[in-house]
Image (cartoon, rainbow, N blue to C red):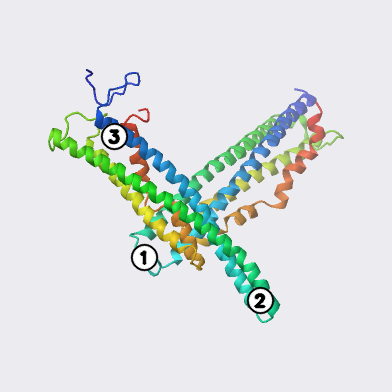
């Protein structure tokens, strides 16, 4: 295969990858937005569970009701589990995004590795007015791949630490969740897609 | 006329129901409708109770703020003018809540009636067929006594839940403790005495009586 053909093949794989990233990014953002009301529910349930544990039912007008405290706690915990189930579904979507991006990035790297010798080092780092260098693009793809992996893992870990008796943790969930998004991370994908926009439009 | 094999539901063939079966089938439909109505009232009641709690909380914080401004005569007039509005709103909410309680009480008495109707059918069956009851189930597999058990369980659960709601409705407008207010609201919304099994019992009754396809 000629050098040009090899570069073209890598470019094609890279374009496809950025296309997928563009699509998956909106799925990711939508899914994150969907999580917010669920986290608010969990926060509210945390408040309710805390109040339930602080109140001495025997000293209230509700003292005559049999097993009220246990029954109420059971219902609240059941509600927590329902919300966690829904969050689990959202996490599955995020996982699909992560995997889709990962697979595409892996494909690009595979292509490059096949043709690396043909392309050669200097061509790999050569930039043009229309296209960033192959090396640059590969680096950005790795950054994006790492971003999604990192974000997914952090959010998954956050959800795994939820326990119905850890009231303050539950109440702080919406803020903790938002803290996982970093300013730098938010801009990474937008900026990268901007940098390759001419490349994407060219053939 | 037809030899009914248990567990085989033919949607094309509508079995001719005798009087007891007819009554029980209607009974099951009534249970379903009453519970739907109850759920709607529950949601409406929660909204009102939530408003009451919020008014109480804002009144408390306002009282705390006004405490610091009570020496000057002019501000006292200001205080009473702004204090009457939430008071009026509170009264309106309480009236609304009482109205909802009336509707729920009426609903529970209708539920009790459903339960006693089924008991009556069981007594009649004992009279006609002896203690063992009829040899063929009225529908698919349930002996008539089972309808009585289900109706009683449901009626008892809603009766208990009603008592809880009555207590909450009486206390929520007088309470100023935040945690207790939260407990009142949670207990109203999550209905501790309506267990998951109640839903399952209702659904199985609807399946048995043919209201739901098998």
Q: Do marks 1 and 3 share a subunit?
A: no
Q: Label 1 vs label 3: CA separation?
A: 38 Å
- Most extreme residue toward the right is A129
Q: Is residue A138 left or right of residue B91?
A: right
In the displayed structure, would residue B171 be above or below residue A153? below
Q: Residues within 10 Å of mark 1 (few under 14, many from 20)?
A: few
Query: Which residue in the structure is indicated by mark 1?
Result: A63
- Give the foreground label among 1 and 3: 3
- Give the foreground label among 2 and 3: 2
Closest to the observer, B153 or A120: B153
- Most extreme residue toward the bottom is B71
Q: Tell me what residue is drawn at x 53 percent, y 56 percent.
A: A44
Q: Tell me what residue is drawn at x 39 percent, y 51 percent.
A: B105
Q: Do marks 1 and 2 share a subunit?
A: no
Marked residue chain, label 2: B
Q: Secondary structure at mark 3?
A: helix
Q: Label 2 vs label 3: CA separation?
A: 65 Å
Q: Secondary structure at mark 2?
A: helix
* Residue B189 seen in render: no
- To which quarter of the image does residue A56 belong? bottom left
- Most extreme residue toward the left is B130
Query: Which residue in the structure is indicated by mark 3?
Result: B24
Give percent across and percent down for residue A106.
64, 35
Q: Secondary structure at mark 1?
A: loop
* Residue B120 seen in render: yes
Query: Which residue in the structure is indicated by mark 2?
Result: B76
Marked residue chain, label 1: A
């Amino acid at each position: 295969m000629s050098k040009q053909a090899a570069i073209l093949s890598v470019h094609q794989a890279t374009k496809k990858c950025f296309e997928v990233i563009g699509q998956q990014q909106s799925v990711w953002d939508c899914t994150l937005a969907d999580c917010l009301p669920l986290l608010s529910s969990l926060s509210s349930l945390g408040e309710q569970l805390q109040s339930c544990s602080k109140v001495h039912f025997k000293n209230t007008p509700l003292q005559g009701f049999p097993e009220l405290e246990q029954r109420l706690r059971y219902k609240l915990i059941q509600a927590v589990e329902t919300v966690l189930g829904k969050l689990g579904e959202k996490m599955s979507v995020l996982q699909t995004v992560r995997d889709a991006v990962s697979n595409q990035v892996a494909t690009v790297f595979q292509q490059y590795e096949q043709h690396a010798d043909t392309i050669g080092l200097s061509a790999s780092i050569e930039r043009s007015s229309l296209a960033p260098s192959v090396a640059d693009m590969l680096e950005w793809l790795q950054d994006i791949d790492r971003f999604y992996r990192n974000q997914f893992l952090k959010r998954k870990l956050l959800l795994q630490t939820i326990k119905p008796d850890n009231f303050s943790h539950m109440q702080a969930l919406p803020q903790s969740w938002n803290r996982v998004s970093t300013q730098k991370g938010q801009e990474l994908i937008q900026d990268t897609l901007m940098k390759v926009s001419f490349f994407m439009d060219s053939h | 006329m037809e030899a009914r094999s248990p567990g085989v539901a033919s949607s094309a063939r509508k079995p001719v129901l005798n009087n007891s079966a007819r009554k029980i089938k209607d009974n099951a439909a009534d249970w379903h409708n009453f519970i739907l109505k109850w759920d709607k009232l529950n949601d409406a009641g929660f909204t009102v109770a939530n408003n009451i709690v919020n008014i109480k909380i804002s009144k408390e914080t306002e009282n705390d703020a006004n405490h610091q401004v009570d020496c000057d005569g002019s501000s006292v007039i200001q205080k009473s003018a702004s204090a009457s509005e939430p008071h009026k709103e509170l009264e309106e909410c309480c009236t609304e809540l009482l109205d909802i309680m009336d509707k729920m009480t009426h609903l529970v008495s209708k539920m009790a009636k459903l339960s006693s109707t089924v008991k009556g059918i069981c007594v009649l069956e004992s009279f006609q067929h002896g203690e063992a009851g009829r040899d063929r189930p009225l529908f698919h597999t349930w002996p008539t006594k089972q309808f009585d058990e289900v109706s009683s369980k449901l009626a008892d659960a809603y009766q208990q839940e009603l008592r809880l709601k009555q207590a909450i409705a009486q206390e929520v407008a007088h309470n100023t403790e935040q945690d207790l207010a939260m407990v009142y609201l949670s207990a109203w919304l999550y209905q501790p005495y309506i267990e998951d099994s109640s839903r399952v019992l209702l659904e199985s009754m609807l399946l048995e009586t043919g209201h739901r396809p098998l």
